Amino acid sequence: MAEWLTENQSENLKLSAKIDKVLYSGASEFQKIEVVHSLEYGNMLALDGVFQTSEREEFIYHEMMSHIPLFLHPNPKHVLIIGGGDGGVARECVRHECVESVTMIEIDGKVVELAKEYLPSIADAMIRKDPKLTVTIGDGIGYVADCENKFDVIIVDCSDPIGPGEGLFTEEFYANTYKALKEDGLFVQQTESPMMHQPLVEKVFGYVANHFPITRLYTAYIPIYPTGMHCFTMGSKKYDPLTWEANRKQGFATKYYNDDIQKAAFALPNFVKDYLIKK
């Protein structure tokens, strides 16, 4: 008999997925982890009761996290991923011919282990041990603090700002991120729903703007996330996505991302502009 996996997205809103199999349910040192098979989305990963990714729709999030910053930068060679334990961002980053190295720092090794076992299409680059990719289990916050002028692009693929992800939403972290980037580097971080998490979005945007000369927000529509409307905050030292022109051909197939979306993703609805304009 099928059951339901439910995420409490707010005090007044829940999202449920009908499931027919629990593939894993347990706890790591850091968080509760569930992997289930859902009838709508295939295998799904949830951390501390929060939906993270699923086989059916994961390409939206992972392509938008990866290709928006990597195509904005004209020649990204060295990429850092903080978090990203399911492997989806790493999978997309190594596809760029100009990228020479992808360093992934994930705090929870259990997530990596389970992704390889139950989400192989997402964890592809980790499973086949892509030569560009180095995966380290450790503290991304501390790693960034010890770096200087090292990376062209940093992608912060983190969970919600609670538990192990909380320190990734502080002004100190963004100051260290700026320092870890090369002189023309840029970074992007997932920053929740602009509809449901306005205080967080506004706060992070302000923190990033305190350190980066170019701070932008972009959106994508991700079915399993709160309201389906998700946003990403970018800090860039040199390249402005609002004046972007294609600098190289894509060279590989994508399911969601394209040149038009590269530009259109930064066109914000008025209600978001209204609360960011003061920043």
Image (cartoon, rainbow, N blue to C red):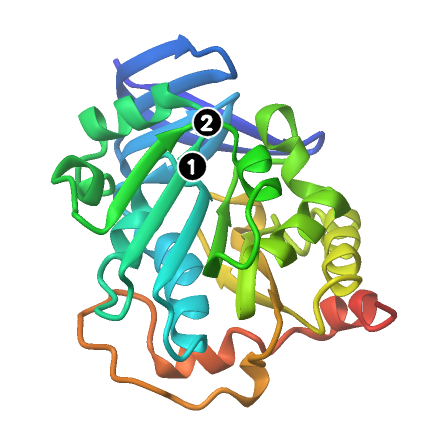
Q: Which mark is residue 138?
A: 2
Nearer to me, 228 or 232: 232
Say which quarter of the image contains residue 129: top left
Instruction: Estimate the x, y position of residue 116 in percent, counting from the top left.
Output: 21, 29
Please name the residue shown 27% across and 61% down the image: 100
State the residue at coordinates (67%, 73%).
269
Is 7 placed above or below 186 here?
above
**Label pair 2/1, CB-CB below 8 angstroms:** yes
Circle 2 sits in a helix, a strand or a loop, which is it?
loop
Residue 249 placed where, x, y %? 25, 84
Q: CA distance from mark 2 to mark 1?
A: 6 Å
Q: Quadrant of residue 142?
A: top right
Confirm whether residue 230 shows in the render.
no
| Spot occupied by residue 49 in the image (x, y as percentages of width and height) | 51, 23
Q: Residue at x 52, y 52 (%)?
A: 228
Q: Which image quadrant is residue 165 in?
A: top right
Disc ID at residue 105? 1
Label 1 sits on a secondary structure element that is strand
Q: Residue at x 38, y 69 (%)?
A: 76
Q: Name the amino acid type tagged 2.
A: Gly
